[in-house]
Image (cartoon, rainbow, N blue to C red):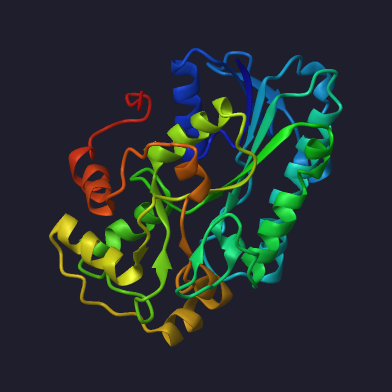
């Protein structure tokens, strides 16, 4: 198939493009610069923040996958940062959806990245795709983010919102941020450690996205999490055991609030006991349901791997 991918330079996008091309698909990557005619993957330029996207030159597209958006974590959320986080997701999704809807033959499916932040801080409540949106900046952003795909939905395109949990990969995301502190014996639980962290391996993210392409029965929100969420304190113990370092440091909630503010409350202390009900009902098979096994694979067994040498096929 001919597959359009935005956000292809990130952790998920890089491996997704590798896997799609390995599977024989033709990938066109949306970039925010002048296309490189010598690039290994065909490139097409757009500027979502300024609404610039001439989709008439795209040609036929079978599938579109949108992974765009500036990183959420990385320090306190000042007003300008929050605006950029929200607008980079909402504007790009709206622009792409409108452009795809206007194509002579729209693609069969648009898969848009979203996040379990949609549910807000929900304590012990089991969360599935049928659960309502929560409260807070991330929840409000996710609601607007998903609604921005309405133009594609109205045009008859099957729209899927991949609500990502914490993606476990040595190449980025959470593990890249906490690996060095834990290796320096500075790891530890956050707050009371009882908050649920819904996680998923990068391999299952890639396989799940490929699965959605071929399963025409699935639409709307889809939780991209393993069936086995863990509490923060369990994550801490597993990290400590995996790298054989003590995790004695406890960061109380007031300290998280003082240092990271709203970002810390919504990303480190929030509890989301999310389950992948739709993927499970559709018969998707996870490669990894044990966080301990994933941590060992990512931090110990495959520490010398390089991008481009791995496929989960």
> In the figure, is residue 100 to the left or right of 200?
right
Instruction: Note whether 245 is above or below 166 in the view shown.
Output: below
**Position of the N terminus by quadrant:** top right
Q: Residue at x 72, y 62 (%)?
A: 83
**Residue 302 screen position, x and y as percent:** 23, 37
Residue placed most toward the observer, 214 or 243: 214
Instruction: Note whether 55 is above or below 273 in the view shown.
Output: above
Q: Is residue 35 visible?
A: no
View extreme (left): residue: 244
Residue placed most toward the observer, 169 or 223: 223
Residue placed most toward the observer, 51 or 102: 102
Q: Residue at x 80, y 32 (%)?
A: 156
**Residue 202 screen position, x and y as percent:** 40, 41
**Residue 183 screen position, x and y as percent:** 21, 60
Instruction: Note whether 165 is above or below 25 in the view shown.
Output: below
**Position of the C terminus by quadrant:** top left
Q: Residue at x 44, y 79 (%)?
A: 256
Q: Quadrant of residue 310?
A: top left
View extreme (front): residue: 281
Q: Is residue 39 visible?
A: yes
Q: Residue at x 53, y 16 (%)?
A: 40
**Residue 154 screen position, x and y as percent:** 84, 38
> In the figure, is residue 290 to the left or right of 277?
left
Instruction: Note whether 92 is above or below 45 in the view shown.
Output: below
> In the figure, is residue 3 to the left or right of 51?
left
Please state the total of marks drawn on the protein image: 0
């Amino acid at each position: 198939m001919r597959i359009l991918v935005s956000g292809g330079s990130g952790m998920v996008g890089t491996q997704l493009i590798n896997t799609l091309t390995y599977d024989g698909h033709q990938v066109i990557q949306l970039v925010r610069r002048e296309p490189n005619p010598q690039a290994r993957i065909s490139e097409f330029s757009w500027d979502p923040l300024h609404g610039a996207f001439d989709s008439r030159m795209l040609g036929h597209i079978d599938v579109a996958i949108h992974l765009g958006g500036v990183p959420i974590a990385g320090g306190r959320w000042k007003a300008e940062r929050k605006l950029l986080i929200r607008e980079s997701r909402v504007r790009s999704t709206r622009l792409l959806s409108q452009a795809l809807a206007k194509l002579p033959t729209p693609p069969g499916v648009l898969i848009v990245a979203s996040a379990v932040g949609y549910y807000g801080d929900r304590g012990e409540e089991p969360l599935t795709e049928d659960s309502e949106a929560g409260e807070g900046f991330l929840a409000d952003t996710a609601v607007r983010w998903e609604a921005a795909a309405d133009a594609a939905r109205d045009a008859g395109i099957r729209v899927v919102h991949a609500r990502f949990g914490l993606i476990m990969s040595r190449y980025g995301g959470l593990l890249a941020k906490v690996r060095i502190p834990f290796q320096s014996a500075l790891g530890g639980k956050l707050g009371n450690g009882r908050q649920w962290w819904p996680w998923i391996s990068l391999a299952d993210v890639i396989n799940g996205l490929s699965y959605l392409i071929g399963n025409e029965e699935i639409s709307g929100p889809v939780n991209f999490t393993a069936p086995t969420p863990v509490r923060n304190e369990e994550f801490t113990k597993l990290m400590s055991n995996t790298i054989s370092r003590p995790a004695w440091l406890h960061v109380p909630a007031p300290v998280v609030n003082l240092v990271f503010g709203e970002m810390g409350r919504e990303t480190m202390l929030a509890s989301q006991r999310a389950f992948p009900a739709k993927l499970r009902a559709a018969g998707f098979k996870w490669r990894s349901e044990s966080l301990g096994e994933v941590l060992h694979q990512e931090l110990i067994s495959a520490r010398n791997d390089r991008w481009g040498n791995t496929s989960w096929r």
